[in-house]
Amino acid sequence: MVSWGTAFKKAMLYVGFLIMWLIIGGVIFGVGFIIGGFGIQVQEVQLGPFSTSMPVPTMVNPLAFVIAVIISYIVVILGTIATFFKIIAEITAEEVERKLKTSSS
């Protein structure tokens, strides 16, 4: 059976990789946000006898932004799942190796 110390070390390793995948996904999201061309457009609004200007958010290329969001989501999800499987396989291999060493002695 895996010791608690090993389990917590692997859990910290997983959290570290999770943060790394979130940063990578955030960078892809940010690039999509920049490519999408988010901006503010000032629009005149008539409210009865008064006229005022209001900022209205606009996006030049929303399709590029949506594609980047989808790609970043896929990268984060697949990266975290792959990391989980890798760490589980590593723990299993270490345990099997330890059991084989102790049983052959």
Image (cartoon, grey):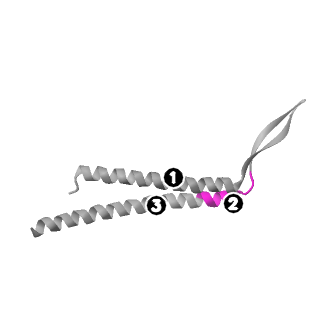
- Residue behind mark 2: 63
- How far separated are the C-alphas under marks 2 and 1? 22 Å
Specify the farthest residue to the bottom. 104
Foreground mark, 3 or 2? 3
In the displayed structure, would residue 91 be above or below residue 38? below
SS state under label 1: helix
Residue at far top of view: 49
91 in the magenta segment: no
Q: Name the residue under label 3.
A: 79
Q: Which of 97 and 2 is in front in this view?
A: 97
First of labels 3, 2 by sequence position: 2
Disc 3 to disc 2, C-alpha distance = 24 Å
Few, some or many C-alpha atoms within 10 Å of disc 2 (few <14, some 14-19, many ≥20)? Answer: few
Q: Looking at the image, tell me whether mark 3 or mark 1 is earlier in sequence order.
A: 1
The secondary element bearing badge 3 is classed as: helix
As drawn, is 69 to the left or to the right of 51? left
Note whether 95 is above or below 30 in the view shown.
below
Q: What stretch is highlighted in magenta?
A: 59-69
Horizontal relation, residue 84 to residue 1: left or right: right
Q: Mark 1 points at which residue?
A: 23
Give residue 97's position: percent from left, percent from top: 21, 66
Q: Measuring 56% from the left and 58% from the top, which residue is drawn there? A: 72
Identify the residue shown where x is 90% and y is 29%: 49
Please tell me which residue is depicted at 57% across the width and 61% down the height of the picture. Answer: 71
Q: Please identify, in this view, whether the residue under mark 2 or under mark 1 is nearer the observer.
A: 1
Identify which amino acid the numbered label 3 is placed on: Gly
CA–CA distance in space, label 3 to label 1: 11 Å
Q: Position of residue 18 (x, y in %)?
A: 44, 53
Question: Which badge, 2 or 1, is on the more N-terminal residue?
Answer: 1
Name the kind of residue labelled 2 in the image.
Leu
